Image (cartoon, helix red, strand yellow):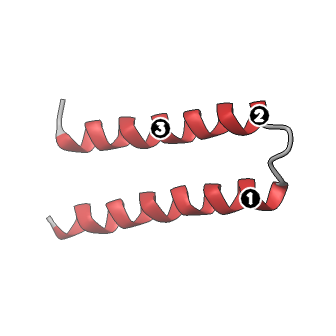
Amino acid sequence: MSDSDTTDEALRRVRDTFETAANEADEMSETARQEVTDAIDTLEERIGELRERL
């Protein structure tokens, strides 16, 4: 498994774990949920940018 595959799998697990936790936490506001989703998206974009440099 390449580093790229490992990173992709880690990002998928982060998203899945967050979704599970958010679904279980009824008190989590939609704003908080969106902020975390945006942060994960930003992380994914940054990783993509770093991959392009290699």
* CA separation in Å, label 3 and label 2: 16 Å
SS state under label 3: helix
Marker disc for residue 32: 1
Q: Quadrant of the N terminus?
A: top left
Q: Tell me what residue is drawn at x 76 percent, y 30 percent.
A: 24
Q: Give whichever of discs 3 and 2 has the lower sequence position.
A: 3
| Viewer-nearest of discs 3 and 1 | 1
Instruction: Identify residue for label 2.
Output: 23
Marks 2 and 3: in contact by CB < 8 Å?
no
Q: Tell me what residue is drawn at x 37 percent, y 66 percent.
A: 46
Which amino acid type is shown beneath numbered disc 2?
A: Asn
Measuring from the top left, give residue 19's x and y in whole percent: 66, 37
Marker disc for residue 12: 3
SS state under label 1: helix
Dividing the picture into quarters, in which one does residue 26 lie?
Answer: top right
Measuring from the top left, give residue 21's x and y in whole percent: 67, 34
Is 49 on the left-hand or right-hand side of 17? Answer: left
**Looking at the picture, does residue 10 appear above or below residue 29?**
above
Circle 3 crowding by C-alpha within 10 Å: few under 14, some 14–19, many from 20: some
33 or 47: nearer the viewer: 33
